[in-house]
Amino acid sequence: MSKNSLEERLAELEMRLAFQDELINTLSDQVAKQEMDIRELWDAKKMLHKQLKDISPSNIRREEEETPPPHY
């Protein structure tokens, strides 16, 4: 192998490494953002679940509203 060929290969490897480092940083930032989004969505889901539970009537009557069974 010639010295020029080795230098070209080294330069190409350095460019690839720089590109991969940039890509890894971009992906890491994206994963962190998505994790925050997921946390916000879970919090919103919990809040909506609580609100729905508070406004929807239960199909089960409270004990004082129940009529006694016929055998009493």
Image (spheres, rainbow, N blue to C red):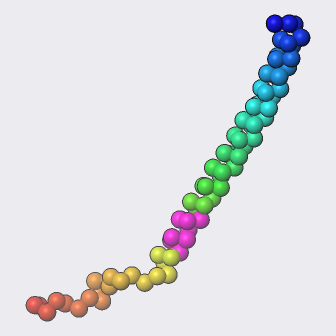
Q: Is residue 14 left or right of residue 43?
A: right
Number of marks in picture: 0
Q: Between 9 and 69, which is closer to the camera in this rendering?
A: 9
Residue projecting furthest to the right: 4
Residue 23 belongs to the span the image colors magenta: no
* Residue at image point 23% right, 91% down: 67
Q: Is residue 15 left or right of residue 31?
A: right
Above or below, comparing residue 71 to residue 40 in the picture: below
Residue 46 belongs to the span the image colors magenta: yes
Residue 34 at x, y = what percent? 66, 51
Which secondary structure dominates the residues rendered in magenta? helix
Residue 71 at x, y = what percent? 10, 90
* Residue at image point 70% right, 40% down: 28
> Image quadrant of residue 62?
bottom left
* Residue at image point 79% right, 32% down: 19
Start-end of magenta stretch? 44-51
Residue 56 at x, y = what percent? 46, 82
For the C terminus, the quadrant is: bottom left
Above or below, comparing residue 29 to residue 7 in the picture: below
* Residue at image point 53% right, 65% down: 46
Q: Between 25 and 63, which is closer to the camera in this rendering?
A: 25
> Image quadrant of residue 59?
bottom left
